[in-house]
Amino acid sequence: MNNSLNTQKPVLPQEVKARLHSIYEEVMWLARRPNTTSSMARAWYAHVAGVRLATKLRLFSGLASKAAIEEEGVTWRLEHFKRIQTTLTQLVERHLAEEINDPEEFLSTIVDCEEVHLVTFHENYAAMSAKGDYEAAGIQLVSWKEVPPELQRLLWSKCLRGRVANASAYAPA
């Protein structure tokens, strides 16, 4: 098993790039519609069109919260610590305001922000409330190699396999 942080950005196949360009056009079209906010338009990527692409784009950072590995009976979440929803909403707002048409910026933002830490359900909400400030949210991160092997196996099968593009880099031996 590779215990180093393996978050090298994925090389995207042309069909994934093409799909992201199309999603950008859809998001921007939605954002220009009456009674539709930038956040609503961004949700098209986050909750509808981008869902199928997530396993090709999303990367595990190699970091888990102490609570996720020490507390019993918790529910785990993959937390977008680079604030993907807020970041995309701001990108859409700026592109509208400045009349920008730049699907490549959208694509690079998606690739950058589709990185996740493994945290608890409650920490996920604490991080959102603290606008990504892990210290303010009380979240302490540890390296994957500090996770006991038996828990690595469980977390890999429940949280990483089939959900992140780099899951194989963290697969148990």
Image (cartoon, rainbow, N blue to C red):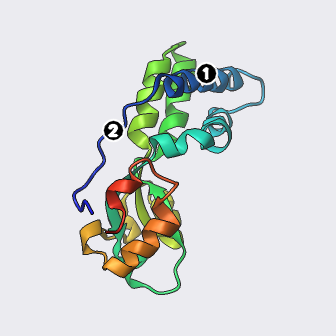
Q: Is residue 133 left or right of residue 32?
A: left
At label 1, counting other C-alpha atoms closer than 10 Å, the crowd grade (few under 14, some 14-19, many 20 or more) is some
- Measured as percent of width and height from the top left, residue 98 is found at 51, 15
Amino acid of disc 2: Lys
Front one among 42 and 154: 154
Q: Is residue 91 left or right of residue 64?
A: right
Vertical relation: 125 (above or below) 151: above
> Do labels 2 and 1 touch, CB within 8 Å?
no
User: How many discs appear?
Assistant: 2
User: What is the spatial separation of the Cα atoms under label 2 and label 1, in whole angstroms?
Assistant: 21 Å
Outermost residue toward the bottom in this view? 72
Residue holding disc 2: 9
Q: Secondary structure at mark 1?
A: helix
Residue holding disc 1: 22
Q: Is residue 153 left or right of residue 20?
A: left
Outermost residue toward the front in this view? 173
- Measured as percent of width and height from the top left, residue 69 is found at 38, 78
Vertical relation: 172 (above or below) 41: below
- Measured as percent of width and height from the top left, residue 36 is found at 73, 31
Q: Is residue 24 left or right of residue 12?
A: right
Front one among 114 and 92: 114
Name the image quarter holding the N terminus.
Answer: bottom left
Q: Secondary structure at mark 2?
A: loop
Amino acid of disc 1: Ser
- Measured as percent of width and height from the top left, residue 132 is found at 41, 55
Find residue 148 and report its image quarter.
Answer: bottom left
> Mark 2 or 1 closer to N-term?
2
Find residue 45 and report its image quarter.
Answer: top right
Is residue 143 visible to the viewer in this orientation of the structure?
no
The residue positioned 44% from the left and 44% from the top of the image is 114
Vertical relation: 47 (above or below) 125: above
The residue positioned 78% from the left and 24% from the top of the image is 34
